[in-house]
Image (cartoon, rainbow, N blue to C red):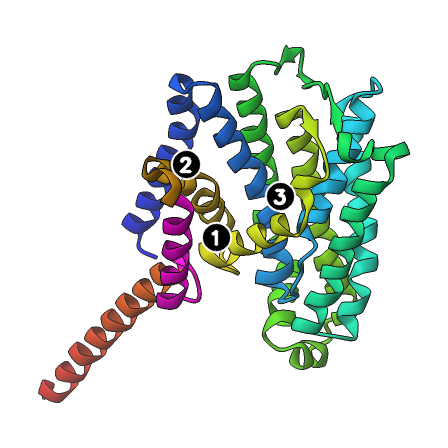
Amino acid sequence: MTINGKYWRIALGIAVIAALIIVPMNFNRYGLYILSQWAVMTIAAMGLNLTLGYAGQVSLAQGAFVGIGAYTAAIMTTQGLPLIAALGVAIVLCFAIGWILGYPALRVQHHYLAFVTLAFSTLAFLVFRNEDWLTKGIYGISGIPRPNVLGFATNRPLPFYYFCLGSLAIVSLAMWWLIRSPWGRAFVALRENPVRALSLGIDTRRYTLMAFAIGSALGGVAGTLYAPLTQYIDPVPFNLSLSLDLLMMVIVGGSGFFFGPFLGAMIAVLLPEWLRFTQGYYLMLYAVAVMLLLIYSPTGILGILDRYLAERRTKAASALRAVAKSRLETAP
């Protein structure tokens, strides 16, 4: 990357962050709710991107972990406990369950593993719906309070949006560090060639379990934010469709790319809202747009950008080789 290109990326990042902070000040309540939902779903998609995009393990259970985090937050905060305590319990609980769910990945792969995680997702939904003593079943849990952060109330939509945005920033920094650490390189090696990774001394068993556990814990973090965002939860939002939506976010944005979940969640959450002017046709147009994108670029939107940059680097390298060859031929 050239110095100018580096500065250009830094300037673009600062502009995007400034826009996310300043522009929503003029949004109404519904607009702030949609942006807060984007931040929450991005965190959940980042967890699935770690499991699928970096470690190469297929999971259809991410929506279930969002549900576990949401019910943990709802149950604890309605009993007077702070949200930070619910967050800690949700992370530990989802991490432990994700670790256990990772054991089938040691024996089965690809669509077989997808069926295992699908079974867990169905089991979690049945627990949410039928265990009235804990989740209140189909009646749901209402009156979920929003937290006070450093003495500031987040009851109003704009402060709570900033709370979600700040949570997304913290998770993003942690994920940025993780994927550039030796753990992140081990996850990528596990995805590319497990046999070669094992021959290089990487404990593929442990890293497979860690990929599931950390990705599941991020789903729990997203659920902990989702509960006070909606202030009412029931089992319906946490059925299989949520896991499929999160899977689509990762694939559409770009599986294995750091910013893939950000873009994929934006497409999944915001695009249907932008297409509402078409009235009853907006879901059809949304589905067609996603299908055309994946036909053109199975690696997602960021895959298109990655191919373009790779072609530019290849052309630049070819031009430099041609210049060097011509100089050698004309040298005395």
Q: Secondary structure at mark 1?
A: helix
Q: Which mark is residue 174?
A: 3
From the viewer's perspective, is 312 left or right of 288? left
**Which badge, 2 or 3, comes first in the chain's sequence?**
3
Eyeballing the image, is 112 above or below 222?
Answer: below
From the viewer's perspective, is 298 left or right of 237? left
Magenta part, dominant SS:
helix
Which quarter of the picture shows residue 20? top left
Residue at the image point whose x is 26% and y is 66% from the top = 312
Q: Which mark is residue 260?
A: 1
**Which percent across, then down, holds residue 323?**
16, 77
Please state which of residues 216 and 318 is positioned toward the viewer in this rendering.
216
Please state which of residues 100 and 281 is positioned toward the viewer in this rendering.
281
From the viewer's perspective, is 73 left or right of 237? right
**Which percent across, then down, holds residue 135?**
82, 34
Q: Are marks 2 and 3 in contact (CB under 8 Å)?
A: no
Residue at the image point whose x is 48% and y is 52% from the top = 260
Please rate how many residues cluster around mark 1, counting C-alpha atoms within 10 Å: few if below 14, some from 14 to 19, many from 20. many
Residue beneath disc 2: 273
* Marks 2 and 1, how far apart at CA: 20 Å
